[in-house]
Every structure is written in C-alpha cells, then in structure tokens.
Image: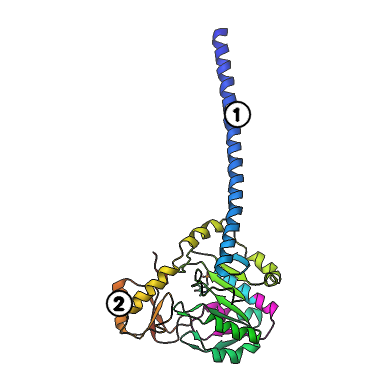
Amino acid sequence: MSFVIIPYSIGFLYNLLLKRIIAVEDTFKKTLFLFLAVEDLETLTKKIDQKLRTLTRHEHVHLTDRGNSAIFLAMHIAKKMNPKADILIPDQGGWFSYKGYPQFFGFNIVEVKTDYGIIDLKDLKRKAKTGSCFIFSSFAGYFAEQPLRKIKTICKKAGCLMIEDASGAIGDTKLCNGNYSDIIVGSFGKWKPVECGYGGWISVKSKEYFDVAQEALSITKVHPQFYREIGEALKNNKFKKLLALQNTVKQELKDFEVLHRDSRGLNVVVKFDPRVLAYCIEKKYPYVLCPSYIRVNERAVSIELKRLSF
Ligand SMILES: Cc1ncc(COP(=O)(O)O)c(C=O)c1O
C-alpha cells in the first residue's frame, strides 16, 4: 500500500510546487511588464513633447483631445493676458470656431479683410489696436500661405496677440513658427496632414500663458495612451507629399482660374467650372463647393487633396 501512496504524495507535492512557481513567475512577469510599460510611456511622452517643441519652435506644449479645445484654450489665454474688447478673425479661409467661440469670452468679433483668404495687411493694421488677439490659419482655407512675418510685425506693434492655427502646416519650416506666433494651435483629426483621427495641441511662447490657464489646461489633458498613437501619426505626416501634389494639380489645371496659383498650399481652389468637377471625378479627388467661410467666399471648387491617404 505504502508503495502506492508515497509516489502519489510526491507527485502531488511536486505539482503543487510547480504551480506555485509558475504563479510567482507570472506575477513577476506582469509586474515587470507594467513597470517597463510605464517607463516606456514616460519616455515616449517626453519624446513627443520635445518633438512638438521642435515642430512649433515653442518651449511650452500641451496636447488636447481635439483642435477646437486648443482654440478655446487660446482664446481663454488671450482674454486673461490681453483683455481688450475685440478678437480679430479673417473674413474667409478660417475655421468655424473662430466665429463660434468668442462669445464665451465676451469678445466682439472683428473681421479682417482678405484677398481670397490671404490677410489684407493694411486692414489688419487699421483693426489690430483694439484686438486682444488675431486668430487665423497658416494656410488660408488650406490652400494659400499667409505672410506670417508681416502679420507678426503688425500684431506686435499694436499689442495684439497672434494665434496661428497650424492644423495644415505642422512640419513646415516656414509656417507653424513660434518665432512669430505667440500661440499655435492645431488639430490631429480626420483629413489633417498629421492624421490621428482625434487630438490637437496648443503651444505658447511664454510659460506665463499656461500659468494663467492652469485649470482649463487640466480639463483638456489627454490620456497618456494618446502619446502612442500621435507618435505614429507624426511619423506619417502627409505635409510634403501634399505640397508636391498641389503643384502637380495646379499645373494640370493651367487653363483654369486657380486662386493664389503661385502660393504654396495643400488644397487647390479654382473658380467654378463644371470641367473642374469632371477633372476631380476622373482623378478621384474629393472636392467641396464654395462659397464657404472655411475656404473662400466665392463660387469655386475646393479640391480637397488633404483628405487623400498616401
Ligand atoms: C483649420 C482647422 N482648425 C481647427 C479644426 C478643429 O479641429 P478638431 O476637429 O480636431 O476639433 C479644424 C478641423 O477640421 C480645422 O480644419
């Protein structure tokens, strides 16, 4: 009898011990994995923040859940830092929230004249003195480059903060430029050159700007997991490919009235002609019809190259 029981007991004890060892090993592995993952995320967060500093040439950056939150934050900062009555926005080539959000801060909206989205510097000069801030897109309607340095000279002289919406220009060495802009905002949402499906950022030239908006900044803080996704999206920036494609399309449309033909941009905007629609259909290019505040106040076709995936 004992011949049977002894081997059985040894086998049982052996199995029990093995299970314990495996369980301890598992716990150890899980702890190690968690430790490494947290470490990794911290390193990644620092890396992305640094990348955004380089891209914006601003020392202080903050990621948001979307571009609109960044725009809201920028207006909040402008109100606190420079409490004047007006907010200046372009009369076309802007974004919807430039018109929608100022009411939350009691700003009076003043539209600056443009030449199909490109800022009329004389009109800006006339209006900037009473402006708390001027918000505009680096590329008017994603299709024509703004004269950033000249805008800066006027805003600085008038004491009006310059807020650049660089949703379409992140990665450009000339635009998205914290040497000129006091605040830069942008979106990483759908159809943007840096396309993550969601997310945005705000960057500022002085720490004081973030100090006055600490509570609002904490409300808009993103989950650290976002850093993993945005890292990939930044690597796949479509910006340069879109600049090149814009050139090709403008050449192909040499017999049409392309607005700001000589200006760099991502989209191509052409005065309305049914043949342009046929061209878009043939090439499978998405397009939207104007007039539209976010492109031009003109009967035109905006060829939305920025929506393409490469
Ligand atoms: C120029 C510009 N600014 C801001 C936004 C808002 O970004 P989001 O949709 O991430 O809030 C958009 C969105 O398309 C945009 O095109």
The numbered mark, 1 or 2, whose residue comes first in the sequence reads: 1
Q: Quadrant of the N terminus?
A: top right
Q: Which residue is mark 1?
A: 20
| Label 1 CB less than 8 angstroms from ligand 1 | no
Tag 1: Cα neighbours inside 10 Å, few (<14), some, or many (≥20)? few
> To which quarter of the image does residue 31 belong?
top right
Q: Residue at x 29, y 82 (%)?
A: 275
Position of 25 with respect to 308 (left or right) is right
SS category of the residue bearing label 2? helix
Q: Considering depth in this image, is 251 or 165 the residue closer to the camera?
A: 251
Q: Quadrant of the C terminus?
A: bottom left
Q: Is residue 52 above or below residue 100?
A: above
- Give, as a single range, the part of the protein colored magenta: 76-100
Task: Give residue 122's mark.
Answer: none
Q: Considering depth in this image, is 307 or 97 the residue closer to the camera?
A: 307
Question: Where does the image place residue 6, in percent across and percent down from the top left?
Answer: 58, 12
Q: Which residue is mark 2?
A: 279
- Color theme of the render: rainbow
Task: Report if residue 83 is visible in the image.
Answer: yes
Q: Considering depth in this image, is 32 or 204 the residue closer to the camera?
A: 204
